Every structure is written in structure tokens, then in C-alpha cells.
Image (cartoon, rainbow, N blue to C red):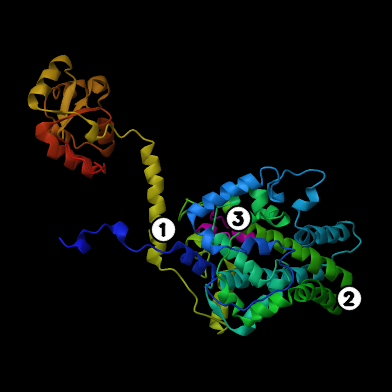
């Protein structure tokens, strides 16, 4: 045997983890630098400033963790400190607090106090404007840019950029990067909206508090910064957001309904609040409510109620398994207007290269998850002692044991103790007594009765041994019944 053939697989070249993490984060590329001055306010700089040489080395990580424990033994990062009267203001991300909580409170005050009445025309205009912003987040920010589930011409991308900003959820660059990090690190400490930290945290808490730099993370967004529309929107996000979210709906309401204040409050502030809360449900409710038909190792779930709130984003278990599929709902009756919107735009030539995972891959996921559920149910039931745990008797041992325990019977090479079942036998006591101390395989399998599957299951709970002469028969019987011998042989 040559040295090459004899060499251990462990000698094969291993993936360079440092380089792999650099590639995954896109740090190997000279990307166009796009800034808008909000990075420090949003706490994003500390969360993406990576040390790839060291952060990919497990020995170094363990050493650094220990050093950080020592460093923060007396002084911890604000996110790790308890909330007190003196430091509560340091825990809060004030930019997001103003945008997500402060401004909506002002709007609701004017609405609920009756100072700014709501007409039916303004209501329907607000709903229309809400839809424009909502579909720009789901079809644009999410499925187009964050996941590249399809491609779009510049007019459609520009539409998404303008009305996506009207939802006041950050720029495409910031939103897309955060979401890619979420998919890369789902249900870990590096997940920006880690669902394991509770419903409130994954819904809003993560953006209203200061993030911990210890869990910084980065994803490759080179494709985003190469899009001139993404760059333009990010550089000028604040004026674009203010215009599209508040000024434009107010002016349109003034022009059509002579209601500037109503347009500002309802089509502006309250509409933004509602669409933000709907979007946040994707991070929270979509990880808590519903079923997990494709995989249950992580928190995402499928739920039609969440889908109604989020323009079809509620089929989240499917999405996390098949993230580049332009669909979230794959069945005709499932609610996914975003999918329909993308498809209609493809008919008009504005969208193209719509991506779908193969039905075979989707069906594989369904079957594997079904099998996991069946295996869990199976493990909770008494299927009888496995054959590999039973003693093997020869004929003389069986006959000797029958003298002290006459309730033994052989079926398919397996010895069963039916002493406590004689009076329960559906065919009567005399019939089963006639089989005691004998091989009743033929009688059990159609000679007298062709016993049901339930009868086989009940009988399996009475196993005590395997007869040496019936090892092959017992093995074949176990295989037909779906029992696993786990690579062991009966001896």
C-alpha cells in the first residue's frame, strides 16, 4: 500500500478558518465606502469592526474571553450592567428610541385626543401608502437586496429605495447587512435579534438598547454597495426618509383632501408605526408562533397569522431553510402577496431571474422533519426489548426453562413469555395454551390466524430470549418490523 493511500484523512488540507471568515464577511474586497454619519449613533461601528486574524482562532478567542472577564470584573460594558437610576440612559439607543417610540407617541397623541380627525378618504390613502412601504421592505429590502432571490431593473429598485425609506427602518445597506448577519448567526449571541432572549427583545428591545461589541459580526454586502441606488439612498438616507415618510404623504393629503395635518399624522407617523411593528413581527412572532415543517433545530416557524401581518413573510421556517427562494409561501392557498407582486413585475420585465429551490430539495426537508417527529414519537413507546439485548438460548436451554416457566412460546425465532396474557388472548385460553413450550410461528402467521400488526406489537413486549436455531428468522422479522440492530449481530 502506498503512503498516499495509507495516509489518514486528517492529513488532508483543512479549510483556513481565518480566510473563510474573511470571505464570508466580504473583507477581502475593496468595497466602495458608503457612509451617512449615523453609524456611531446606531452602534454599528463597534459591531462590525472585526479582527479576522484573531477572531477566527479558537485558542485566541478563549484567551480573549478570559482576558475580557478579568477586564470587566469591576467594569463591564453597559449592555452587561444592570439597569439603575444613574445609568439607564446609557443603555438606550437614542436614535432608534426617537424614531420608533418618540415620534409614534406624538402621532398617537394627536390621533387619540381628537385634535386631528381621520376622514375615510385619508384612511384609505394611508392604507395605500402603507402597502407601498410594506412591499418595498418585503420585496425590496428583504427578498431582493438581503437575499438576492431575484434581480430587478433600476426603476423597480428606485421605487423600493424611496418607499422603503418611507417605512423608517434604516437604509438598504444597514438593513441588508443586519439581516444577513441574522441568517448567518441565527439563534446565537451574534444574532442581532436573537429570539432566545425573549419575545420583547427580538421584537423591539434589540434596537432600543446598546448592542454588546463582544458579539460583533459582519457579513458580505459587496453586492449591495455596488448598486448605485443603494449607495445613493444610504448617503442621503435622512432627507430621503423625512421626505418620503412624512413630507410627501402630508403634501399629497393637502393636495387631494385639503388635510395637511391629517396626512402628516395618519399617512405619516401612524402609518410608519404600524409598518414598523408589522416588520418587527418577522423577528419576533415568526420565531415563536406556528409550526416547523422543514427543520426544528432553530426557532423560525411557519404561521398564517404572522403572514397576514407581514405581507406573506410569516412562512419563516421555509424562508430560513430556503432563503434565496423568492417565495415564502409555496402552496397556492398560502398568503404571500409579496410573491405575487414580484411575479407580476417579472411579467412586466421589471423583475427577472426569479429563484426557486427545487421541489426535490423542498420535499426532502419535509420528509426529514416528518421522520424526526416520527422517531421522537417512536422513542417514547415500548417496542419490546431489542433483539441485541436478549440472551441466545439453544434448544436444551429453552426446554429446561420451560420446566420452570411453562408460559413460553417461540414465534419467528424469538422466545416470548405469554404467562400473563393467556386470559387476555382474543382467540381464547385453550388456543394459546396449545402453543406453550412450542414453536408457534406458522400458526401465528396464518396457519390459524394471520395476526395483525397490533398483535405483533403486543407480542414484542413479551420477549425474553432468541433461540439459536432461529437467529436468522428473528433478524428478518425485526427488519420487517423496522427495528434497527445498530450494526450488531445476534450470537
Q: Earlier in the sequence, mark 1 or mark 3?
A: 3
Q: Which mark is residue 293?
A: none
Query: Closer to the observer: label 1 or label 3?
Result: 3
Q: CA distance from mark 1 to mark 2?
A: 55 Å
The quarter of the picture where the C terminus appears is top left
* Location of mark 1 (residue): 365
Q: CA distance from mark 2 to mark 3?
A: 50 Å
Span of residues in magenta: 300-317
Secondary structure of the residue carrying numbered label 1: helix
> Are the residues at dot 2 and dot 3 in contact (C-beta closer than 8 Å)?
no
Relative to 49, is 101 on the left or the right?
right
Q: Which mark is residue 258?
A: 2
Q: Residue 73, percent across and down?
A: 66, 43
* Location of mark 3 (residue): 215
| Residue lying at 19% horizontally and 37% vertically, measured from the top left | 450
Q: Earlier in the sequence, mark 1 or mark 2?
A: 2
**Is residue 133 depicted above or below 95 in this figure?**
below
> Are the residues at dot 1 and dot 3 in contact (C-beta closer than 8 Å)?
no
One can see residue 331 in this view? no
Crowding at dot 1, Cα within 10 Å, few <14 / some 14-19 / many 20+, comes out as some
One can see residue 295 in this view? yes
Q: Residue 142, percent across and down?
A: 60, 68
| Residue lying at 16% horizontally and 18% vertically, measured from the top left | 406
Return the residue nearer the eye: 401 or 312.
401
Secondary structure of the residue carrying numbered label 2: loop
**Is residue 404 depicted above or below 438 in this figure?**
above
Amino acid at each position: 500500500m502506498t503512503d498516499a493511500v495509507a495516509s489518514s484523512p486528517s492529513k488532508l488540507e483543512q479549510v483556513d478558518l481565518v480566510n473563510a471568515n474573511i470571505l464570508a464577511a466580504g473583507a477581502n474586497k475593496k468595497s466602495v465606502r458608503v457612509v451617512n454619519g449615523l453609524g456611531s449613533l446606531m452602534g454599528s461601528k463597534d459591531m462590525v469592526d472585526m479582527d479576522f486574524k484573531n477572531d477566527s482562532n479558537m485558542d485566541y478567542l478563549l484567551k480573549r474571553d478570559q482576558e475580557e472577564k478579568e477586564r470587566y470584573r469591576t467594569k463591564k460594558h453597559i449592555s452587561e450592567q444592570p439597569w439603575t437610576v444613574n445609568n439607564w440612559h446609557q443603555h438606550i439607543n437614542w436614535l432608534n428610541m426617537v424614531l420608533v417610540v418618540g415620534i409614534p407617541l406624538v402621532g398617537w397623541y394627536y390621533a387619540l385626543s381628537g385634535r386631528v380627525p381621520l376622514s375615510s378618504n385619508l384612511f384609505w390613502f394611508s392604507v395605500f401608502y402603507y402597502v407601498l412601504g410594506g412591499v418595498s421592505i418585503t420585496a425590496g429590502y428583504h427578498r431582493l437586496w438581503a437575499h438576492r432571490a431575484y434581480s430587478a431593473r433600476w426603476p423597480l429598485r428606485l421605487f423600493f429605495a424611496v418607499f422603503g425609506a418611507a417605512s423608517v427602518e434604516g437604509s438598504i445597506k444597514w438593513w441588508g447587512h443586519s439581516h444577513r448577519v441574522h441568517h448567518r448567526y441565527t439563534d446565537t449571541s451574534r444574532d442581532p435579534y436573537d429570539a432566545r432572549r425573549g419575545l420583547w427583545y427580538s421584537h423591539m428591545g434589540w434596537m432600543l438598547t446598546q448592542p454588546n461589541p463582544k458579539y460583533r459580526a459582519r457579513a458580505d454586502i459587496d453586492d449591495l454597495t455596488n448598486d448605485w441606488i443603494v449607495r445613493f439612498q444610504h448617503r442621503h438616507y435622512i432627507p430621503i426618509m423625512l421626505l418620503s415618510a412624512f413630507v410627501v404623504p402630508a403634501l399629497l393629503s393637502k393636495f387631494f383632501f385639503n388635510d395637511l395635518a391629517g396626512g402628516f399624522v395618519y399617512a405619516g407617523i401612524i402609518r410608519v408605526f404600524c409598518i414598523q411593528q408589522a416588520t418587527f413581527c418577522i423577528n419576533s412572532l415568526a420565531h415563536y408562533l406556528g409550526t416547523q415543517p422543514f427543520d426544528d433545530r432553530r426557532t423560525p416557524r411557519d404561521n398564517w397569522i404572522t403572514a397576514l401581518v407581514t405581507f406573506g413573510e410569516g412562512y419563516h421556517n421555509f424562508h430560513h431553510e430556503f432563503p434565496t427562494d423568492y417565495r415564502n409561501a409555496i402552496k397556492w392557498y398560502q398568503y404571500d402577496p409579496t410573491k405575487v407582486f414580484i411575479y407580476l413585475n417579472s411579467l412586466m420585465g421589471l423583475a427577472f431571474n426569479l429563484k426557486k429551490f427545487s421541489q426535490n430539495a423542498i420535499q426532502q426537508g419535509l420528509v426529514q422533519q416528518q421522520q424526526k417527529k416520527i422517531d421522537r414519537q417512536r422513542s417514547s413507546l415500548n417496542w419490546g426489548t431489542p433483539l441485541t439485548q436478549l440472551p441466545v438460548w439453544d434448544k436444551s436451554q429453552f426446554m429446561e426453562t420451560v420446566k420452570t416457566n411453562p408460559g413460553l412460546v417461540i414465534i419467528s425465532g424469538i422466545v416470548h413469555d405469554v404467562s400473563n396474557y393467556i386470559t387476555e388472548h382474543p382467540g381464547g385460553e385453550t388456543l394459546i395454551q396449545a402453543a406453550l413450550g412450542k414453536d408457534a410461528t406458522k400458526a401465528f402467521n396464518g396457519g390459524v390466524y394471520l395476526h395483525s400488526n397490533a398483535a405483533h406489537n403486543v407480542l414484542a413486549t413479551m420477549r425474553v430470549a432468541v433461540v439459536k436455531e432461529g437467529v436468522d428468522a428473528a433478524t428478518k422479522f425485526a427488519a420487517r418490523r423496522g427495528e434497527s440492530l445498530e450494526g450488531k449481530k445476534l450470537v
